[in-house]
Image (cartoon, rainbow, N blue to C red):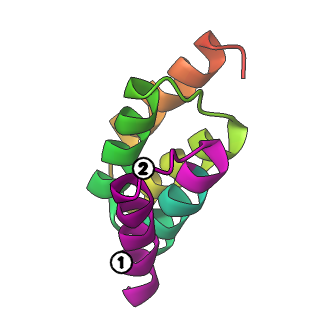
Amino acid sequence: GGRTGTAIDLLSEMKGRGIEPDVITYNAAISACEKGSRTDTALDLLTEMKGRGIEPNVITYSAAISSCEKGGRTGTAIDLLSEMKGRGI
């Protein structure tokens, strides 16, 4: 939906202005993707945040797993659940 784009735009604008996003910012964007059925974008954001050294938390994984479930990506959801357990979350 339109709000998903807004959340992604805000995240991009923050990075463009040199404001470093944190786990809360990424959680909001991933959650918006989940609600907007944008599974690939949600997963891209999860990968990006880990690449920036930002540790995902239970909220991050919950939104990403839910997005995978809604997008029919059961295997990816199971992988994320396993990764989450491996990180002790």
Disc on res. 5: 1
The verdict on residue 15 being magenta is: yes
**At label 2, which amino acid type do we have?**
Gly
Which segment did they paint magenta?
Answer: 1-26
The correct choice, above or below, for 12 with respect to 73 in the image is below
Q: Is 71 placed left or right of 56 in the picture?
A: left
The verdict on residue 77 being magenta is: no
Give the Cα distance between marks 1 and 2.
Answer: 20 Å
**Residue drawn at 36 percent across, 34 percent down:** 47
Disc on res. 18: 2
Q: Identify the image quadrant of the N terminus.
A: bottom left
Q: Identify the image quadrant of the C terminus.
A: top right
The correct choice, above or below, for 41 with respect to 32 in the image is above
**Along the line of sight, the residue nearer the viewer: 45 or 75:** 45
Spot occupied by residue 77 in the image (x, y as percentages of width and height)? 45, 38
Q: Residues within 10 Å of mark 2 (few under 14, many from 20)?
A: few
**At label 1, which amino acid type do we have?**
Gly
Q: Which of the marked residues, 1 or 2, is nearer the chain's N terminus?
A: 1
**Along the line of sight, the residue nearer the viewer: 38 or 9:** 9
Decide whether the magenta segment is chiefly helix, strand or loop: helix
Spot occupied by residue 14 in the image (x, y as percentages of width and height)? 45, 60
The correct choice, above or below, for 57 with respect to 79 in the image is below
**Residue drawn at 39 percent across, 53 percent down:** 15
**Residue drawn at 38 percent across, 46 percent down:** 45
Front of the two marks 1 and 2: 2
Spot occupied by residue 60 in the image (x, y as percentages of width and height)? 60, 44
Residue 5 is drawn in which quadrant?
bottom left
**Residue drawn at 66 percent across, 50 percent down:** 24
Helix, strand or loop at disc 2?
loop
Spot occupied by residue 57 in the image (x, y as percentages of width and height)? 67, 34
Q: Residues within 10 Å of mark 1 (few under 14, many from 20)?
A: some
